Image: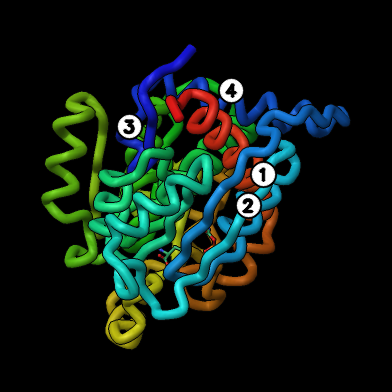
Amino acid sequence: MVTKMKHLLSLLEYNESEFVKVLDLAEKTKADWAKGKRPDLLPRKVLGLIFEKPSLRTRVSFEAAMMQMGGNSIFLGTSDGKIGVRETVADFSRTISHYVDAVVLRTFSHETVLEFAKNSTVPVINGLSDQFHPCQSVADILTIREAFGPKPGKTVVFVGDGNNVSRSLAIACALAGYHFILTGPKPYHFDTNFTNLFSKRFPKADLIQSTDANDSVKNADILYTDVWTSMGQESENEKRIKKFKDFQINDRLINKAPKHCKFMHCLPAHRGEEVTGSVIDGKASLVFEQAGNRMHAQKAILLDMILNSKK
Ligand code: CP
Ligand code: NVA
């Protein structure tokens, strides 16, 4: 069936049942792969990866996913730092649409992702912008479902910055029927643009923001964190370390959470800043299962985007 071309820019493109379908598909492709099934699900399809910033997990999991499904990928790291310097973002997008079946973009500005998608005739997948990291959140919810089962109602407490990872995670939790709490210093809570967007889309969902980490973690099923200084914010590093110092996930904080609570981090981690090595390497940690799930999530995203698009 030929349907309208899709993009995945923030996760807000999905409704609740579409999101569950992608998660179910990720579980199935993961289980099939473990059973030794090797179907060519995307034969001769080509994925373009255009990255303004470094990446280990996103790049390699997408490239490996394409190869495992019988397709291939082309990686373009922008040597001049940003897309839109050598030629406009629109010209770049309109050109590469003729060569590839989908594009993963990693950008500094989310505006670049929006401009690229507006001009693309193939699906555009946001592989991280300053605003959102939707592919990460698909793998995150897949990991939570594996650890706790598919039922809604879990409580995810994000300790740290109101950034790309926590924004997408908040959306993913709302789509999955989980409670979401952000705890961190007030100036780094979500901006009102995001909270307004969120409340409009999910009028019944929780979006609690607190400055008291000790209190917020009390009912957590999952404690999640990310770096205090994201790519592109390096000049703020010293200031951020001071502001976030009381929001480290360490043994003391994790001991205030329920015994069954699990720890997650999108990685890369700055050990000794937002999290201690003892927590990342401790028994509550799911971080490497979570990193591994990036590839199964990418497969489901690619199948959903490429097979359901009209090119
Ligand atoms: N979590 C994540 O997106 O990792 P990379 O920056 O290595 O892709
Ligand atoms: N918030 C981090 C996530 C890295 C995967 C960053 O943008 O650098």
Q: Is residue 80 visible?
A: yes
Which residue is label 3 attached to? 13
Query: Callout 3 environment at 10 Å: few (<14), some (14 to 19), or many (20+)?
Result: few
Observer-side mark, 1 or 3, equals 1
Q: CA distance from mark 2 to mark 4?
A: 25 Å
Query: Callout 2 environment at 10 Å: few (<14), some (14 to 19), or many (20+)?
Result: many
Q: Residue at x 42, y 39 (%)?
A: 122
Say whether disc 1 or disc 3 marks the residue closer to the N-terminus.
3
Give x and y (percent) for residue 88: 27, 64
Say whether disc 3 or disc 4 marks the residue closer to the N-terminus.
3
Q: How is the image coloured?
A: rainbow
- Image mark for residue 172: none
Image quarter of residue 269? bottom right
Q: Which amino acid type is marked by label 2? A: Ser
Q: Residue at x 22, y 58 (%)?
A: 189
Depth order, front residue of 228/235: 235
Observer-side mark, 2 or 4, equals 2
Which residue is label 2 attached to? 73
Which residue is label 1 attached to? 66
Q: Is residue 28 above or below residue 296?
A: above
The answer to whether the beta carbon of the residue marked 1 is less than 8 Å from any atom of ligand 1 is no
